[in-house]
Structure formats: structure tokens, C-alpha cells
């Protein structure tokens, strides 16, 4: 049956959907019996006079909906009973897959909605609940700060509550920390590829960004030392574990070197530990080595949910805590008392650990899909992370690739968003926004097909 040819000329809408619809109909009527082998995708594309990516997208959709099976090296085969064409569903009716938003997945086993409903109900029935709904201290009330100290203390060691503050998300906290440390024109050392939110906050304050070279292990201590000598920075910003975007994790020895360089040159460290809770074997944070010069920021957005808008920060001392609280008040008054209280309850009863463990497991499953679908490509990833860094093949340029991906309904982030200086030919792919593993597989397969062909072979001109 390798001569199968669907009829799609009279169909309206995207051609890949017309191919899937024709496939389902031919299986239903018996024209394609169970076990029938389908033509190679390239042959079918030539026969139908469509792009190869159109056929690949159709075959991925047919596999997702249970019409066919595909085995590398053997081809694609009809599975058996086909659903009615009108019953074929997509996770997203638009056919799009979002690889741009770097958020944790929400696996069913985490039961996040159920836990939120139960937790909020218990809070509403607890003594003093109405007091929680009033204005709170900009540093967080003492109960929430104590819970934060407990959560951070697992990785930093024992922390006095007066050195811990609660903020309305990492972006708010980072902006406030910059306001405390810097004056316009001051220099801030950052990795050559760095978090866009930090760049935006620094640029709005007139802070001069100094890019520091990195390698496969992350920030280079020798390059940081040279920057300290040449640029006299006030602070260094670093994501030590599962760096955004490169996924690099600084080895313990390198963390010690960076702390030593910073201390010897009077440079503060802003440690953005957004992903530190995900790997079970992550090295100790830099703040555990040099807490007296480190502003350690740990958000729940990357290990639980961005909807909580809660971040915890451990500051070097009491004076810094007072100044940071004043900046937090000026920026957004206070963190949400309701979500702060919910997070504190989850810390106390162990629910937060359960949620993080479920997300860690789901990330591991999604990374397995990455290894399968993007095999042979220049990918940097971490087994427990929900983003990856992909260097493009030589035949592609990042802007052109991003545009072609958008035409296929795929959104990625090109390296320009992270670069402080020349941008490499690379993209960040985030895995958490896809609703499930099959949607993820579908989108990654399309990306892999796009990457395998030169730009001139991919066209939407008809």
C-alpha cells in the first residue's frame, strides 16, 4: 500500500489536516487495512506537491490520534480501527505549540488545582484568616518569613528569619535588589547569555552590563576575575543551577572560585536560584559559601507554578533586609498574602515537596522525549530541567529559523533575547507549556524536520 495517495484538493483549511482527514477516512472505509504500510513522507510530499514539513506534521498528528504507528527505520503503518474524522482532536485547536514560555509543566499527579482548592479552603477556615487579608509588612509577615527560612535552609543551612524576605515573584525581587545595590552607570557582571528579565530591570536603572565569558560548565571564574580588575563591578549576577538559557550547572569547585573572586574584590553576588530545587543532586548554593555577600533569590515560579508569584530572598544582613523591604514596598507594596500563606502551609505539611517531586519526574519524562526526537542535534539539557539550549545547524540562521517555526505554529526564543553582545546561532526551547508528552513530541518532531532541511527547501509560497 506504499502507493496510497490521499485526495485533498477539494478540502479547505491547512493541508496537513486534510491529509489526516483523508487517512482517517480511508482507514474507516477499509481502503487502508490494519498493518498497511504508508508511503515514505518525502515521496508523499512530492506526489501531493506540498512541503515535506506538511506531510511530517500530518503523520505526527496521525500518530498522536492513534491512526498510525511509526518506527525509525521501518516506516509508518496503519494501526487498525480509526476514529471518525470528526472526532480527531488537537490539544490546541490552532495547532500551535508554545516553546517560548519557560514554566514548569503541570502533571496530573501533582494535583495542583486540588491542592490549591483544599489549601485555600483550610486557610479560609483557620483562625486569623481575615488578618491575612489585610496589608502585610513589605518583607512578608513573620510566619511566612519563617516558612521561607525553613524552605531555604534546606540548601543554605540555618537562616535567621530577619535575613529572609518574601517577595511577589523573582522579577520584583531582582528589581528591588538592583535598586539597593546600584546607582546609574555602575557595572554589573552577567553571563554573556543571561536572563532577559534581569537585563530589562538593569537597563531601566541605567546599570552597565558587563558580559562574562562562559563555557560548558557555566560562568568562567578566570573571566570573572579579569572583569573585576578591568570594570570594577558592584555585583555579579548568576544562575548557578540549570542556567537560563544554557542549562549549565556550575560545579562546586567553580562556585567556590567565584565566591573567592567576589570576596577579594568587594563584589556582591546576586544568585538567582530559580531552578535549584529541581535536581536532587544540585551543588550547594553560593550563598551557603558566602552568605555575607550574596543575595540569594529562590522563586516558586520555576519549581511549582508562576501563578503563585512568590519568591524568597536571603540577604547578607539586617541592614540589607531593611533597605530591600523599603524597595519592595515602593515597587509593589507586598507579596500576595493569600498565595504567601498557601505556600507557607504547603512547606509546613510537606505538600510543596510532593509538588516539586512530581514536576521533577515530569521533566525527566519530557527530557526523554527530547532525546528521542532531537537525536543527533547540538542540544544542551539537564535531566530534570524544563528548557534546553539548541545550537542551530550551519544551514540555518536564528532569525530565519524563528520565522519558519512561527509559520508552523511553533514559538521558540532566539538567542538575541539573552545575549549581552554578539548573539550565537541558537534557540531556547521550553518544555513546560506543552499540555502533555504527545503534544511535546508533535512540536519537537516538527522542529527536528525543519532543522534537517535548508531554508530554501521550506516555503509557504503557493
Image (tube, grey):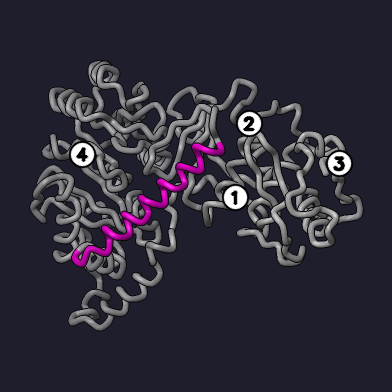
Mark toward the viewer: 3 or 4:
3
Q: Is residue 159 left or right of residue 186?
A: left
Is 300 in front, or is 297? Answer: 300
Label 4, secondary structure: give it: loop
- Crowding near the residue tagged with mark 3, few <14, some 14–19, many ≥20 C-alpha atoms within 10 Å: few
Q: Is residue 199 visible?
A: no
- Label disc, if present, on residue 154 of the rendered structure: none
Q: Nearer the viewer, mark 4 or mark 2?
A: 2
The magenta segment: 348-373
Residue appearing at x 40%, y 63% in the figure: 109
The percent position of residue 80, horizontal first and vertical second, equals 72, 57
* Residue at (57% x, 52% y) in the render: 438
- Can you tell which quarter of the image residue 49 is in? top right
The secondary element bearing badge 1 is classed as strand
* Vertical arrangement, residue 399 with respect to residue 435, above or below: above
Q: Is the C-beta separation of discs 4 and 2 under 8 Å?
A: no
Q: Secondary structure at mark 2?
A: helix
Work out whether mark 3 precedes mark 2 in sequence or the reverse, and give the earlier one: 3
Q: Which residue is mark 3?
A: 3
Q: Are marks 1 and 2 in contact (CB under 8 Å)?
A: no
Please report whichever mark, 3 or 1, sits nearer to the chain's N-terminal start.
3
CA separation, marks 3 and 1?
Answer: 32 Å
Q: CA distance from mark 1 to mark 2?
A: 16 Å
377 up-or-down from 111: above or below? above
**Label 4 crowd (10 A; few <14 / some 14-19 / many >=20):** many
Earlier sequence position, callout 4 versus callout 2: 4
The residues tagged by marks 3 and 2 sit, at their Cα atoms, a distance apart of 28 Å
Find out whether residue 186 is within the magenta segment. no
Dot 1 crowding, Cα within 10 Å, few <14, some 14–19, many 20+? many
On the image, the x and y values in percent for residue 157 come to 11, 46
Q: Which mark is residue 451?
A: 2
For label 4, the residue is: 285
Amino acid at each position: 500500500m506504499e502507493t496510497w495517495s490521499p485526495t485533498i484538493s477539494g478540502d479547505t483549511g491547512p493541508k496537513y489536516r486534510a491529509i489526516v482527514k483523508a487517512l482517517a477516512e480511508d482507514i474507516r472505509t477499509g481502503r487502508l487495512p490494519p498493518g498497511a504500510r504508508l508511503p515514505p513522507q518525502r515521496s508523499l510530499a512530492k506526489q501531493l506537491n506540498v512541503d515535506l514539513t506538511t506531510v511530517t506534521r500530518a503523520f505526527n498528528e496521525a500518530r498522536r490520534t492513534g491512526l498510525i504507528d511509526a518506527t525509525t527505520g521501518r516506516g509508518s503503518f496503519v494501526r487498525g480501527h480509526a476514529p471518525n474524522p470528526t472526532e480527531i482532536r488537537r490539544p490546541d485547536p490552532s495547532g500551535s505549540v508554545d516553546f517560548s514560555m519557560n514554566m514548569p509543566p503541570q502533571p496530573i499527579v501533582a494535583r495542583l488545582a486540588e491542592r490549591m482548592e483544599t489549601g485555600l479552603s483550610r486557610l479560609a477556615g483557620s483562625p486569623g484568616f481575615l488578618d491575612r487579608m489585610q496589608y502585610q509588612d513589605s518583607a512578608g509577615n513573620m510566619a511566612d518569613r519563617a516558612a521561607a527560612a525553613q524552605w531555604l535552609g534546606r540548601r543554605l543551612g540555618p537562616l535567621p528569619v530577619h535575613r529572609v524576605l518574601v517577595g511577589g515573584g523573582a522579577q520584583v525581587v531582582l528589581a528591588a535588589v538592583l535598586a539597593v545595590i546600584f546607582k546609574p552607570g555602575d557595572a554589573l557582571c552577567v553571563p554573556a547569555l543571561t536572563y532577559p528579565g534581569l537585563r530589562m530591570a538593569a537597563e531601566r536603572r541605567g546599570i552597565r552590563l558587563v558580559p562574562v565569558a562562559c563555557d560548558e560548565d557555566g560562568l568562567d571564574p578566570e573571566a570573572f576575575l579579569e572583569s573585576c580588575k578591568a570594570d570594577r563591578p558592584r555585583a555579579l549576577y548568576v544562575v548557578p543551577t540549570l542556567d537560563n538559557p544554557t542549562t549549565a550547572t556550575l560545579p562546586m569547585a567553580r562556585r567556590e572560585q567565584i565566591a573567592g573572586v567576589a570576596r577579594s574584590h568587594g563584589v556582591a553576588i546576586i544568585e538567582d536560584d530559580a531552578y535549584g530545587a529541581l535536581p536532587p543532586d544540585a551543588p550547594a548554593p553560593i550563598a551557603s559559601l558566602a552568605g555575607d555577600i550574596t543575595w540569594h533569590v529562590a522563586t516558586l515560579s520555576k519549581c511549582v507554578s508562576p501563578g503563585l508569584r512568590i519568591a524568597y530572598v536571603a540577604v547578607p544582613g539586617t541592614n540589607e533586609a531593611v533597605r530591600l523591604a523599603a524597595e519592595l514596598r515602593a515597587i509593589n507594596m507586598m507579596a500576595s498574602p493569600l498565595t504567601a500563606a498557601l505556600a507557607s502551609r504547603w512547606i509546613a505539611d510537606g505538600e510543596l515537596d510532593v509538588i516539586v517531586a512530581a514536576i521533577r519526574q515530569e521533566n525527566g519524562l519530557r527530557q526523554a522525549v527530547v532525546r528521542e526526537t532531537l537525536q543527533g542535534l547540538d542540544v544542551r539539557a539537564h535531566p530534570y530541567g524544563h528548557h534546553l539550549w539548541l545550537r542551530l545547524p550551519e544551514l540555518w540562521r536564528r532569525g530565519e529559523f524563528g520565522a519558519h517555526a512561527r509559520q508552523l505554529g511553533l514559538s521558540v526564543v532566539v538567542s538575541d533575547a539573552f545575549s549581552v553582545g554578539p548573539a550565537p546561532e541558537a534557540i531556547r526551547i521550553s518544555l513546560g507549556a506543552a499540555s502533555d508528552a504527545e503534544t511535546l513530541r508533535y512540536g519537537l518532531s516538527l522542529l527536528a524536520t525543519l532543522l534537517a532541511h535548508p531554508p530554501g527547501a521550506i516555503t509557504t509560497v503557493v
